[in-house]
Image (spheres, grey):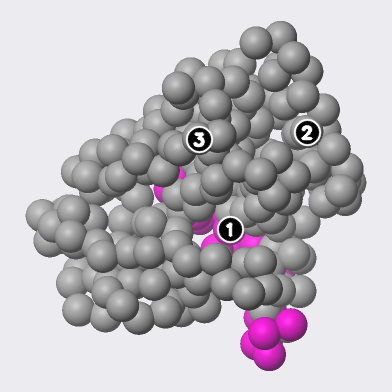
Amino acid sequence: MAQSVITLDGPAGSGKGTIAHRVATALGWHMLDSGALYRLVAFDAISKDIALDDEPALTELARSLEVEFVANDSGATDIVLHEKKVTLDIRTEECGCAASEVAACSAVRAALLERQRDFLQSPGLVADGRDMGTVVFPDAIVKVYLTASAEVRAGRRQKQLKEQGHDAKMSGLVRDIQERDARDMGRKDSPLKPADDALIIDTDQLSIDEVVDKVLTLVNSRLKLK
């Protein structure tokens, strides 16, 4: 069953979510945004004034999350937490940084592991995150690791924030991204790294279409070999 999975891992801002959505749409497969689950735990913790280093309390939040991913009329996905739509709320810089801290808690990762695997349904799943190919779906038929320089990723984030009406300095965004990378790559449990058999794609000089084409070409060749 796990062979019906495509994993897309990589650091923040490498394009995982956009590429995963495009690939899943092209294949007609389901999609898992694993980062959203950690953002939801972080958002819930912040909302309830729970410290981000309170592992027992965070673990209980992870176990009890009432979350739904609902397709909307525009073809995107709405994220509903405890019956409230929080799609935009969990995409803030504050929530992203908090999610990186939450993800360092081993007990939280363990609590979310089976929940992530439960997303696998026929005909297949495209899963994006930081340990999809190394831990959650180690037998995936295709594993991709997307990367880009901190400066390029910060530029993408700055553009995204401006489109949302927010201002942000490049220097601050680069620093935040570097700090998140250090936390994600340095954590003891499930550190961010490419799977041994992953295709590594540097997206610095590539368009979204070019990356999608690379991934789909690999997927099609692997599916023909099954």
Q: Are marks 1 and 3 in contact (CB under 8 Å)?
A: no
Q: Earlier in the sequence, mark 3 or mark 2?
A: 3
* Nearer to the camera, 93 or 131: 131
Q: Quadrant of residue 147?
A: top right
Q: Quadrant of residue 111?
A: top left
Query: What is the secondary structure assignment of the residue under circle 1?
Result: helix
24 over 74 or under it: above or below: above
Give the residue at x 50% y 48%.
Answer: 32
User: Circle 2: is it few (<14), some (14-19), or many (20+) Cα within 10 Å?
Assistant: some
What's the distance in space between the residues labelled 1 and 3, CA to CA?
Answer: 35 Å
Q: Earlier in the sequence, mark 2 or mark 1?
A: 1
25 over 192 or under it: above or below: below
- The residue beneath circle 1 is 177
Q: Give the residue furthest to the bottom.
A: 165
Q: Quadrant of residue 136?
A: top left
Q: Main secondary structure of the magenta part?
A: helix
What range is drawn magenta here? 163-187
Query: What is the secondary structure assignment of the residue under circle 2?
Result: helix
Q: Earlier in the sequence, mark 1 or mark 3?
A: 3
213 within the magenta span: no
Q: Give the residue furthest to the left.
A: 56
* Residue 2 percent across, percent down from the top left: 46, 23
- The residue beneath circle 2 is 216
How many marks on residues?
A: 3
- The residue beneath circle 3 is 122
**Circle 3 or circle 2, nearest the eye:** 3
What's the distance in space between the residues labelled 2 and 1, CA to CA?
Answer: 28 Å
